Amino acid sequence: MKKTLSAITALMLVVSAWAAKEKPAVTETNLTPEQIEANYTRAIEGRTADILKVLELSDTNRSAKVHDVIIAQYRALRAWHAANDPKLKAAKGDTNAVAQIRSSLKSLHDEFIAKLSANLTPEQVEKVKDKMTYGKVQFTYAGYLASYPDLADQHKQKILELLKEAREEAMDAGSAEEKTAIFQKCKGKINNYLSQQGIRSARDKEKAAKPAADK
């Protein structure tokens, strides 16, 4: 149990560090467009450097290609959200309109994965996805394993499946807050799934086992 908690604590530190990097600096109205752009470039270069560090690519040419693909994706996502977030807000409630607007984001996502896959192994692409979403898949999954220690393999697989679906969406989010909200929504789906399967957490079982006087 102590080892599990230590692993979760370590993941929390990683998530916190990445979330801090993702958060934009306090807006300064006196900054010029050039200064704003320079700040943004420094931010995405830092995120990309962290990703490349994890990939440990020995081929400098391949490393440069992956660097350019990731930087281009960050810029493309920024431009997409700047152009489409107001449209999504205006279309809120109209599922057809929202789907149509978001279809171009799906295309952007698929093109990015295809470019990564042309230069990286499937395992390395997974690492990129995890770094772009602060390792929330592993962190959240470890939390469920700790809370539900008796999960069958099929339920573990389903939890991972839902978390990875959330990761695909979170990769395209415009901010750390949006990424977190996507995973929170995913946790709701997982909790509903476990409830439908009649699976209770270790904590709930412990509460149920206590005499009424102790509750």
Image (cartoon, grey):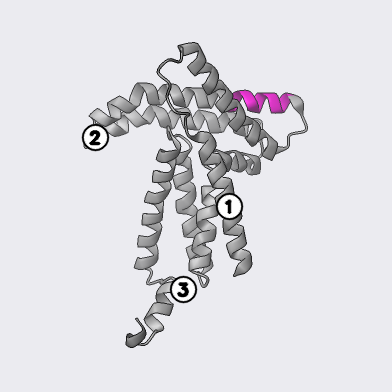
Q: What residue type is disc 1 on? A: Leu
Residue holding disc 3: 202
Which residue is drawn at the image coordinates 45% and 40% (left, top)? 170
Residue 120 found in image quarter: top right
Q: Name the residue located 35 percent from the left edge and 61 percent from the top edge.
A: 192
Looking at the rendering, which quadrant does residue 61 occupy? top right
Q: Do we see residue 96 in this rendering?
A: yes
- From the image, which quarter does the N terminus lie in? bottom right
Residue type at numbered disc 2: Lys
Residue in the picture at 48% in, 67% down: 147
Tell me, yes or no, whether the highlighted magenta stretch contains residue 25.
no
Whether label 2 touches label 3, CB < 8 Å: no
Crowding at label 3, few (<14), some or many (≥20) Cα neighbours within 10 Å? some
Q: Nearer the viewer, mark 2 or mark 3?
A: 3
Position of residue 121 measured from the top left corner of the image (x, y, whole percent): 66, 39
Instruction: Point out the stretch of residues depicted in magenta.
Output: 61-70
Question: What residue type is disc 3 on?
Answer: Ala
Q: Secondary structure at mark 3?
A: helix
- Chain-order first, disc 2 or disc 3: 2
Q: Is residue 169 in view?
A: no
Q: Which residue is mark 1?
A: 11
The CA distance from mark 3 to mark 1 is 21 Å
**Is most of the magenta stretch helix, strand or loop?**
helix
Q: Name which residue lies at 52% across and 26% down.
A: 73
Position above or below: 5 against 212: above
Q: Is residue 46 left or right of residue 28?
A: right
- Foreground label between 3 and 1: 1
Q: Residues within 10 Å of mark 2 (few under 14, many from 20)?
A: few
* Residue 62 part of the magenta segment: yes
User: What residue is shown with label 2?
Assistant: 92
